[in-house]
């Protein structure tokens, strides 16, 4: 694990490639089945830089859609969240909807979320999962922390906080650069709901999440409908 981390090309200008190298080193050295790295600047702005497989990506999408889970807790508290067994842990009581969705849609049994921080700055989260239950050994724990240190330094160069990229005046909502990738539609849809309902970005994202949850859909799917104008939010929507 240590050799794999030391071998990462930190001078690469492609941050997704770097994120992939960190995740692959974790999968190879920590006895886990998958990994992902997400970058964030606030609760309304988050982007998956790299996911090792469809299950890792689904875990990211579920947490972002539902607004809860190990990754969200790690990002909020700044502390690692270690769940050796999703089926037998009091930890999941904090996010029962996410835990139920994981049990229904995946074979994942263990989750480990490490916040990526530089000083007091919260940059993102390294998410790890395992199909079988079980915790991390002391060496794996140390290696996981080493991986987060490398990823945190890497992310400093891509962390952005533009004031108003979409033309909406909302000082409470730092944004990721929409060009970062797949969640650009969520950022755009949030902006459209802001305009439709004259609310803040935080409230607009909450409306999108509530609609996705009540209709058993991913947030990405609802956002796509809003951007395509197949769905328009009104005050009396339920």
Image (cartoon, helix red, strand yellow):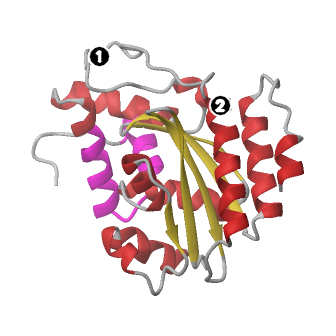
Which mark is drawn over residue 49? none
Up-down relation of residue 50 to residue 65 (above or below) = above
- Tell me how far mark 2 sits from mark 1, CA to CA: 31 Å
Of the numbered discs 2 and 1, the one sitting upstream in the chain is 2
> Element under label 1?
loop
Quadrant in the picture for the N terminus: bottom right
Main SS of residues in magenta: helix
What residue is at 25 percent from the left and 20 percent from the top?
A: 170
State the SS at label 2: helix
Quarter containing the C terminus: bottom left
* Residue 178 shown left or right of residue 44 in the figure: right
On screen, residue 154 above or below 81: above
Structural crowding at the residue carrying mark 1, measured as other residues with C-alpha within 10 Å and reported as few (<14), some (14–19) or many (≥20)? some
Q: Residue at x 72, y 31 (%)?
A: 15
Instruction: Choose between 139 and 122: the one closer to the eye.
Output: 139
Q: Nearer the viewer, residue 146 or 21?
A: 146
Percent position (x, y) of residue 120?
A: 43, 33
Q: Is residue 25 visible?
A: yes
Identify the residue at horizontal 34%, vertical 73% (top origin): 96
The residue carrying mark 2 is 153
Foreground residue among 62 and 217: 62
Q: Where is mark 1, residue-wise?
A: 168
The magenta region covers 204-230
């Amino acid at each position: 694990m240590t050799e794999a981390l030391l071998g990462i090309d930190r001078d690469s200008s492609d941050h997704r490639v770097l994120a992939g190298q960190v995740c692959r080193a974790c999968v190879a050295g920590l006895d886990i089945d998958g990994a992902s790295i997400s970058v964030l600047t606030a609760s309304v702005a988050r982007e998956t830089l790299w996911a090792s497989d469809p299950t890792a990506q689904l875990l990211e999408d579920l947490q972002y859609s539902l607004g809860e889970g190990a990754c969200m807790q790690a990002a909020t508290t700044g502390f690692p969240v270690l769940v050796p067994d999703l089926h037998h842990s009091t930890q999941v009581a904090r996010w029962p909807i996410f835990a139920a969705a994981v049990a229904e849609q995946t074979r994942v049994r263990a989750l480990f979320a490490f916040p990526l921080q530089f000083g007091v700055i919260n940059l993102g989260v390294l998410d790890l999962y395992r199909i079988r239950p079980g915790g991390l050994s002391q060496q794996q724990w140390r290696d996981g922390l080493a991986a987060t240190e490398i990823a945190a330094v890497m992310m400093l160069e891509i962390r952005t906080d533009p004031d108003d990229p979409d033309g909406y005046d909302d000082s409470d909502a730092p944004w990721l650069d929409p060009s970062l990738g797949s969640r650009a539609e969520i950022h755009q849809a949030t902006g459209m709901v802001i305009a439709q309902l004259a609310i803040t970005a935080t409230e607009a994202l909450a409306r999108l999440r509530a609609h996705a949850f009540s209709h058993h859909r991913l947030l990405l799917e609802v956002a796509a409908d809003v951007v395509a104008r197949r769905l328009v939010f009104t005050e009396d929507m339920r």
